[in-house]
Image (cartoon, coloured by chain):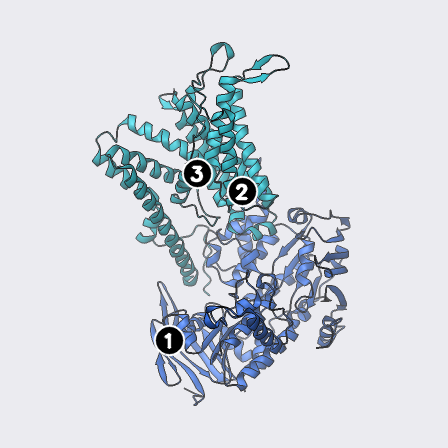
């Protein structure tokens, strides 16, 4: 073989086919935006963009957590139920408080503490998922499917199936301010969007620049090889489920905050949108492949597609068909891209 | 065409296969003689697997023709090739691990009169086939529970069932020990006597000399040479394959051996159903020493290495690295931290992470060491990776390349590089040169010798007698889970090793 210099960065001649495939999600996003902007004059208004982005954010948090889980080789079907359950936890703490019959008092936590408890609740459910999957060796699909029902059940039990209305809180109890998270603006930008940016940056950082991030990709790519390389496989898998649970709690907080009420049915089927966003963004259900950036774009595609179709007046039923087709086509192209990429890589090595 | 005779059952003429951007085969002629072993050799990338796939119907040639028994044939898929009597056993054995041996053998050829499978009959026939191969494999065993060499025997049995006229075997002996190879060769001679044509692809040149009748050498997609086996020797083969002479490509070097780096006492790994995978094994490895671990299939070599790297918490032992005892049971990351690391037998299943780049694969076992306060800097590790690529002669255009784009030999070097970056005191290797071409093999031998010279202790398991004998300063032989012999360089013969590896076995 020729003695070619090993280059640090790969130099590939430009290929239109590969370019289109690689950036297909962004291209799809642009196409969708252009289509809807032409079809509806209200589409490209600041008001509408902010509204759509708020919707996207709710799904994006779930999708980011889902990305980590799927990249590690697992799946988390319980996130939608965690959204509902966290809302109910918040509702209970604001409306009912913690009654201590022994002392004849009711404790009302400050809003900040309520948020921490809500995040912890998501984390605990994630930890339970992680425990069942790593210690009891139950397959992730089954474990999180079971948790989907268990968590939803507890959400319904918490107030006998009823909603906790009026989460405004009372000033003398110190638990006001909750609606600000979902409805408020900081520097004219809605709070959920700030949260989205911060979480997305942290998640991308975790994925690319921390040992845990590398380990997650390794475990999803080849668990045995990762184990032999000294990766603590069970610890890694446990952690991604906790992350997924906490992010689901973030989403649950925003949902309850926007409604200013906690409904036990909140979040039903949210996990499917989360999986769709991750998969549209290039996350492979086999594990080992995916990116936070891709997932965010995927979440925008799903969100804008959904909202855009409503704006344009497409019937609910057709919306479902279109959404389903978009997902199938996206994944089919993804499979194709992977094999084209692989073949190109092999040829590159043969040429050298 | 020299040597063209009437016994040619299959003729490939001018076969060309072009992929976008690369020419895998260019105008290759290949004669397959019935009742003979037709050897096909070449370095990785020379085109032998492509030619093999064209014959087996797994690829369609861009140009050229296949003529079988006088008539031209065109295979659109492997099933069509099979119906013409062409069978193939791939190196990456494609059996279903979740099904039994008998079920695998009869897959798509079930004994099912009136659409109901006769499992009893299938088991009987399977048992008979396996007995002909002189292997005591229970037809009810799940294939996934068998070791690699047993799986190969099952693959051969499966091909036997298909009554092939041309049987292509891709590296059939890569995981078999000397005795098992002898059994396979007996079977091959049996097939020959029935008129079956064997196309045999292998990197094991001494074996080819034993079993081959005709040899064809490919280089860079072209036919380099073809000849009857008589009058051809290993030097000729190597010369045709690489275009230069390699004197003796397994370097024999003496090493100065120093203090003990690894001491193992009473390593015990029990089987759940009774008996032992490894029993009361005690041995040591010194700095600068290469210790070879030889044994038959099922002797426990892989299991022993896996216990050392912490994969089996049910095992027990006293293990000391540089005199300090290590915790039992321990996890793999603890063992790596103490200076033990394993290059596994199956690089696809347990060596490389297919979805990652070369660079990420190489740094995988040492990622934590690049992190400052939990953060990995952007260019972290690139220096180490480039150094490894250079030192191990890993052929890759860039470290960002997907690891799956590399040849088998280079992938193995990536796994070795990953192990070396953990700065081990003892390097454990399980079949380090399995399924790798001549050039890469000799490079890996060179790497092992260099590491020993620098003071690393190496414990490597191999089923290739010549390899064990040339590389090892000391040889440990295992049989049925026990260490049955220990030999120092120069103080033993091949027969000693073979005898020790058969101890405790009831004569066949």
| Between marks 2 and 1 in the image, the one whose residue lies nearer the viewer | 2
> If you read the primary sequence from the N terminus, does the residue marked by circle 3 or circle 2 appear first?
2
Q: CA distance from mark 3 to mark 2?
A: 14 Å
Circle 3 Cα neighbour tier, 10 Å, few/some/many (<14 / 14–19 / ≥20): many
The answer to whether any part of residue A226 appears in the image is yes
In the rendered picture, chain A carries what hue?
cyan
Q: Quadrant of residue A184?
A: top left
Q: Residue at x 21, y 31 (%)?
A: A41
- List x then y, in percent, for residue B463: 64, 69
Circle 1 Cα neighbour tier, 10 Å, few/some/many (<14 / 14–19 / ≥20): many
Per the image, the residue denoted by label 1 is: B15
- List x then y, in percent, for residue B327: 73, 47
Chain identifier of the residue bearing label 2 in the image: A
Per the image, the residue denoted by label 3 is: A271
Per the image, the residue denoted by label 2 is: A143
Q: CA distance from mark 2 to mark 1?
A: 53 Å
Q: Residue at x 42, y 19 (%)?
A: A180
- List x then y, in percent, for residue B290: 69, 62
Q: Are marks 2 and 1 on the same chain?
A: no
Compared to B147, does B358 lie above or below?
Answer: above
Q: CA distance from mark 1 to mark 3?
A: 53 Å
Chain letter, blue in picture: B
**What SS does tag 1 mark?**
strand
The answer to whether any part of residue B378 appears in the image is no
């Amino acid at each position: 073989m020729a003695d070619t210099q090993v280059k640090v960065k790969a130099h590939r001649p430009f290929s239109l086919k590969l370019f289109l495939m690689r950036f297909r999600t962004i291209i799809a996003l642009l196409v969708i935006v252009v289509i809807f902007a032409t079809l509806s004059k209200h589409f490209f208004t600041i008001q509408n963009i902010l509204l759509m982005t708020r919707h996207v954010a709710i799904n994006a948090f779930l999708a980011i957590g889902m990305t980590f889980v799927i990249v590690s080789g697992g799946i988390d079907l319980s996130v939608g139920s965690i959204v509902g359950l966290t809302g109910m936890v918040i509702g209970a703490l604001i409306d009912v408080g913690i009654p201590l019959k022994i002392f004849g008092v009711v404790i009302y936590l400050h809003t900040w503490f309520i948020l921490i408890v809500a995040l912890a609740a998501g984390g605990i459910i994630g930890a339970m998922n992680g425990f069942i999957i790593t210690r009891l060796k139950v397959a992730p699909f089954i474990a999180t499917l079971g948790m989907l029902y268990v968590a939803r059940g507890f959400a319904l039990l918490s107030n006998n199936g009823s909603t906790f209305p009026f989460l405004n809180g009372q000033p003398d109890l110190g638990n006001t301010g909750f609606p600000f998270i979902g409805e408020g603006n900081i520097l004219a930008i809605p709070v959920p969007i700030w949260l989205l940016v911060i979480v997305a940056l942290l998640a991308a950082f975790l994925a690319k620049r921390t040992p845990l991030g590398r380990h997650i990709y390794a475990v999803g790519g080849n668990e045995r090889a990762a184990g032999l390389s000294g990766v603590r496989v069970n610890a890694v898998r446990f952690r991604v489920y906790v992350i997924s649970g906490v992010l689901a709690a973030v989403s649950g907080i925003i949902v309850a905050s926007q409604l200013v009420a906690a409904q036990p049915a909140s979040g039903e089927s949210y996990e499917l949108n989360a999986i769709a966003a991750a998969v549209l963004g290039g996350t492979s259900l086999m594990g080992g492949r995916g990116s936070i950036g891709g997932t965010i774009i995927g979440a925008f595609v799903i969100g804008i597609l959904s909202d855009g179709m409503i704006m344009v007046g497409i019937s609910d039923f057709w919306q479902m068909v279109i959404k389903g087709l978009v997902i199938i086509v996206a994944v089919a192209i993804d499979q194709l891209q992977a094999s084209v990429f692989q073949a190109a890589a092999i040829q590159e090595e043969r040429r050298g | 065409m020299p040597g063209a005779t009437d016994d040619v059952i299959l003729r490939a003429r001018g076969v060309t296969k072009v992929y976008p951007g690369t020419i895998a085969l260019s105008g290759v002629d290949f004669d397959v003689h019935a009742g003979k072993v037709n050897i096909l050799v070449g370095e990785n990338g020379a085109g032998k697997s492509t030619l093999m796939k064209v014959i087996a119907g797994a690829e369609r040639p861009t140009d050229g023709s296949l003529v079988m028994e006088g008539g031209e044939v065109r295979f659109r898929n492997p099933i069509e090739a099979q119906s013409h009597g062409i069978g193939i056993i791939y190196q990456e054995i494609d059996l279903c691990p979740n099904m039994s041996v008998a079920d695998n053998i009869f897959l798509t050829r079930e004994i099912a009169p009136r659409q109901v499978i006769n499992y009893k009959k299938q088991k009987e026939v399977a048992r008979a086939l396996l007995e002909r191969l002189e292997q005591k494999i229970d037809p009810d065993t799940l294939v996934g529970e068998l070791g690699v060499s047993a799986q190969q025997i099952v693959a051969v049995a499966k091909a036997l069932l298909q009554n092939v006229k041309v049987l292509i075997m891709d590296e059939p002996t890569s995981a078999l020990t000397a005795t098992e190879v002898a059994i396979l060769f007996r079977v091959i001679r049996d097939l020959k006597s029935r008129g079956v044509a064997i196309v045999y692809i292998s990197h094991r040149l001494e074996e080819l000399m034993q079993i081959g009748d005709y040899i064809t050498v490919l280089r860079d997609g072209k036919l380099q040479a073809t000849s009857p086996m008589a009058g051809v020797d290993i030097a000729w083969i190597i010369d045709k394959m690489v275009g230069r002479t390699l004197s003796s490509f397994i370097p024999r070097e003496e090493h100065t051996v120093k203090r003990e780096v690894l001491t193992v006492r009473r390593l015990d790994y029990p089987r759940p159903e009774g008996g032992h995978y490894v029993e009361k094994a005690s041995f040591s490895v010194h700095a600068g020493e290469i210790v070879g671990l030889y044994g038959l299939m099922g002797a426990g070599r892989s299991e022993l290495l896996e216990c050392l790297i912490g994969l089996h918490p049910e095992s027990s032992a006293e293990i000391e690295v540089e005199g300090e005892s290590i915790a039992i049971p321990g996890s793999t990351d603890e063992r790596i931290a103490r200076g033990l690391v394993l290059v596994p037998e199956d690089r696809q299943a347990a060596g490389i992470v297919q979805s990652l780049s070369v660079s990420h694969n190489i740094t995988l076992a040492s990622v934590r060491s690049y992190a400052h306060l939990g953060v990995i800097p952007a260019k972290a590790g690139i220096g180490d990776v480039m150094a490894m690529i250079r030192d191990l002669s890993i052929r890759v255009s860039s470290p960002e390349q997907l690891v799956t784009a590399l040849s088998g030999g280079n992938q193995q070097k990536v796994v070795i590089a990953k192990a070396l970056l953990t700065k081990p005191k003892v390097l454990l290797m399980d079949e380090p040169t399995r399924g790798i071409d001549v050039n890469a093999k000799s490079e890996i031998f060179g790497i092992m010798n260099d590491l020993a010279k620098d003071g690393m202790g190496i414990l490597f398991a191999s089923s290739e007698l010549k390899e064990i004998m040339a590389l090892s300063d000391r040889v440990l032989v295992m049989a049925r889970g026990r260490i049955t012999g220990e030999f120092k360089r120069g103080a033993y013969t091949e027969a000693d090793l073979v005898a020790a590896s058969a101890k405790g076995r009831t004569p066949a």
